[in-house]
Image (cartoon, rainbow, N blue to C red):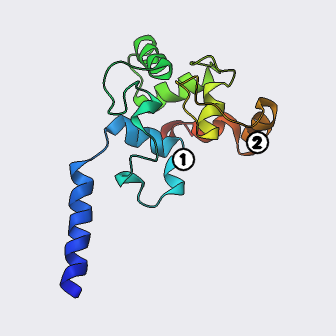
Amino acid sequence: MRQGWRWALSLLLLGGTVSAMPPFRLTAIQQLGYDKLDPLWQYSGKVMSCTFCHVNRQGGAPWNAFGQALQHGFQANPNDNFSQVLYGVLAANGDSDGDGYPDAIEVFARTLPGDPDSHPSVPLAELERQFQAAGGLAQYVPKSKK
């Protein structure tokens, strides 16, 4: 019985390393607080799917509207790291996908800021109140800037 438990744990850990997430995604998950809801977030594609920034579920080109905003952020600030660019895009208070919800509000509501079909079901004014009560944009400041 003890051997079976160790084998299952090894298989789980091995599976996690085979499907490791890209560094940008790992950084975004932690910076945006998405890791707080799932103790096994490093092994889950559900915590933040590739479609957060990409059109395709597997990632890669093409990028959705939010992914393009990040690309423009890197072009405008080539010396910034990913955390700084991500914060800059959210701080710009843009609505990448044009669905009426700013990107930072969509991140807070856990919808996709680059997909106009994915938007919160809660009215914007209520979400903005909740967002400010939770700390507003300050909750997404990169750790190096806090």
Relative horizontal placement of residue 143, taking residue 45 as reference (left or right):
right
Q: Residues within 10 Å of mark 2 (few under 14, many from 20)?
A: some
Provide residue 126's location: percent of width, then percent of height: 80, 37
Relative horizontal placement of residue 38, taking residue 132 as reference (left or right):
left
Where is mark 1, residue-wise? 33
SS category of the residue bearing label 1: loop
Where is mark 2, residue-wise? 130
Residue 107 in which image quadrant? top right
User: Residue sitting at 45 percent across and 38 percent down?
Assistant: 28
- Measured in 3D between alpha carbons, the distance from the residue under mark 1 to the one under mark 2, in whole angstroms, is 15 Å
Q: Nearer the viewer, residue 95 or 70?
A: 95
User: Residue sitting at 44 percent across and 47 percent down?
Assistant: 46
Question: What is the quadrant of the C terminus in the image?
Answer: top right
Q: Residues within 10 Å of mark 1 (few under 14, many from 20)?
A: some
Q: Compared to 2, does 88 lie above or below?
A: above
Total tally of numbered discs in the picture:
2
User: Residue sitting at 39 percent across and 51 percent down?
Assistant: 44
Q: Amino acid at mark 1?
A: Gly
Q: Amino acid at mark 2?
A: Gln
Q: Nearer the viewer, residue 108 or 90?
A: 108
Provide residue 69's location: percent of width, then percent of height: 49, 17
Residue 71 in which image quadrant? top left
Relative horizontal placement of residue 62, taking residue 15 as reference (left or right):
right
Q: Nearer the viewer, residue 125 or 79?
A: 125
Contact flag, marks 1 and 2 (Cβ < 8 Å):
no
Question: What is the quadrant of the N terminus in the image?
Answer: bottom left
Relative horizontal placement of residue 77, taking residue 113 as reference (left or right):
left
Provide residue 5's location: percent of width, then percent of height: 25, 79
Provide residue 85's location: percent of width, then percent of height: 47, 25
Q: Which is nearer the N-term, disc 1 or disc 2?
A: 1
